[in-house]
Amino acid sequence: MLSPLVAFGVRCLLVGLFLPFSALDKLLNFRQAAAQASQAVSSWFLATVLIACGFCIEVGMSAAILTGIADRLAAFILAGYCIMTALLWKQFWKRPDFRLQGASAGRDVFWDFMKNVALAGGFLLLSFGPDARGVERFFHHPLESSHPYAALEPSNGR
């Protein structure tokens, strides 16, 4: 009985950055988010499209992971989203003050970059499972659910 609650709690921790926080921030501060996005793309229109797409990805894929509906594919998409946002907005290598010791805004961006990469790893683990067999299974059946809340069958003392 406790297992489904733990599974749900773990999934809440994994997507909590996006739903509700980042998605809500995009709604409440859309102009600021679009301004940040316009630093990576040259067009204000494209920046607003990116923010709107990001909002849809954050809400839709997080909901899929929480419900367990096509959750493996949703996690795969969020992994890609984390990598793309790291590459577009966490460009520590472009910071003139990136250094390993002392005050460095570039190093702070580096750690944000690495957090995005680590979160992508967590989503890929959800997509593929704990072993190499899951990678092949995912690509053969990408819409398959992991059935995160299915009751375990009793082991009959085994």
Image (cartoon, rainbow, N blue to C red):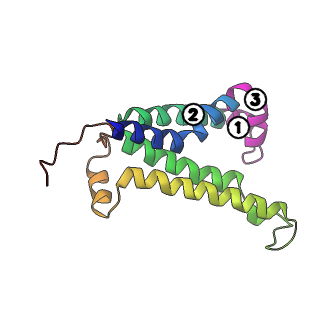
Q: Main secondary structure of the magenta part?
A: helix
Mark 2: amino acid = Leu
Q: CA distance from mark 1 to mark 3?
A: 14 Å
Residue at 78% over, 64% down: 107
Mark 1 / mark 3, whichever is N-terminal: 3
The residue singled out by tag 2 in the image is 19
Quarter location, residue 48: top right
- The stretch in magenta equals 26-48
Residue at 75% over, 29% down: 29
Look at discs 1 and 3 and give the one toward the viewer.
Answer: 3
Residue 79: percent from the left, percent from the top?
A: 50, 50
Q: Secondary structure at mark 2?
A: helix
| In the depicted structure, whether residue 84 falls above or below residue 93 | above
Residue 19: percent from the left, percent from the top?
A: 57, 33
Mark 1: amino acid = Ala
- Counting other residues with Cα less than 10 Å from the Cα at mark 1, is it few (<14), some (14-19), or many (20 or more)? many
Screen quadrant of the C terminus: bottom left
Quarter location, residue 131: bottom left
- Counting other residues with Cα less than 10 Å from the Cα at mark 3, is it few (<14), some (14-19), or many (20 or more)? few
- Counting other residues with Cα less than 10 Å from the Cα at mark 2, is it few (<14), some (14-19), or many (20 or more)? many
* Viewer-closest of 88 and 129: 129
Mark 1 / mark 2, whichever is N-terminal: 2
For residue 47, which numbered disc appears in the image? 1
Mark 3: amino acid = Asn
Q: CA distance from mark 2 to mark 3?
A: 15 Å
